[in-house]
Image (cartoon, grey):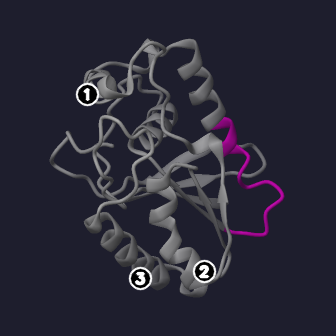
Amino acid sequence: MHQIVLIRHGEAAKSPTDGDPGLTGLGRQQAVELAQELQRQYPDGSGVRLISSPKARARQTAMPVSRLWRKPLIERDDFIEIPSPQGIPLAERGNWIQTFLDSDWGNLTSEQALWRTGLMRALSGLGKDSAAKTTLVFCHFLVINAVVAAIRKDERVTQFLADYTSQTRLNLDPDSGALSIEALGRERTDRNQIR
């Protein structure tokens, strides 16, 4: 069995004009604390592979543990945040996401459906041809909820409110590609903080 840990990025700067905001000061501190926690869980990163969404907030969350373990951080577009529907300007993305959280996965555009299919395919393939026993994937709120919903076969978009740097643990059967949930990550109480 291969373990996959979906790690939500730390607190990101909010901006209606920046499509790729980095971490806030608090988010950088959360990333440092996460690295220390991961060191306790996986001493020196033995048997662990690091993968990240290409977005700055995910990469910056992963960098402290990547430096600590002197391990490369593999960026993969498969784990990027859900694309906005065409025609929605960046300044309106936050409003669209807040509405989308109360909907279901059947409301995806064709581009978003391809995103979700690619995400699940990428996760199912992580156990193949890898010497690592565990893969840490630094990603986003809706990535985590899309995966949990698919495994549960539950169409609600919001499965749980993954907090910053929370760790959702999955088990992957490398032969079949089947995924199961071992444990959901820590939840937050404020649903407005998903960026």
Of 32 and 14, nearer the camera is 14
> Image point 44% across, 20% down: which residue?
105
Residue type at mark 1 is Gln
The answer to whether any part of residue 6 appears in the image is: no
Q: Looking at the image, tell me whether mark 1 or mark 2 is earlier in sequence order.
A: 2
Dividing the picture into quadrants, the one containing residue 2 is bottom right
What residue is drawn where x is 57% and y is 29%? 116
Measured along the vertical axis of the image, is residue 176 above or below residue 185?
above
State the residue in front, 85 or 134: 85
Q: Which image quadrant: the N terminus? A: bottom right
Q: Which residue is mark 3?
A: 36
Q: How many marks?
A: 3
Determine whether the residue tagged by mark 2 lies in a helix, strand or loop: helix
Q: Which residues are magenta?
A: 120-133
Q: Quadrant of residue 74?
A: bottom right
Identify the mark nearer the N-term, 3 or 1. 3
Identify the residue under disc 1. Answer: 98
Callout 3 amino acid: Gln
> Left or right: 186 with respect to 36?
left
List x then y, in percent, for residue 49.
Answer: 66, 67
What amino acid is labelled 2 in the image? Answer: Gly
Task: Give the x, y percent position of residue 140.
Answer: 44, 46
Q: Does the magenta stretch mainly form a helix, a strand or a loop? A: loop
| Residue positioned 59% across, 87% down in the render | 44
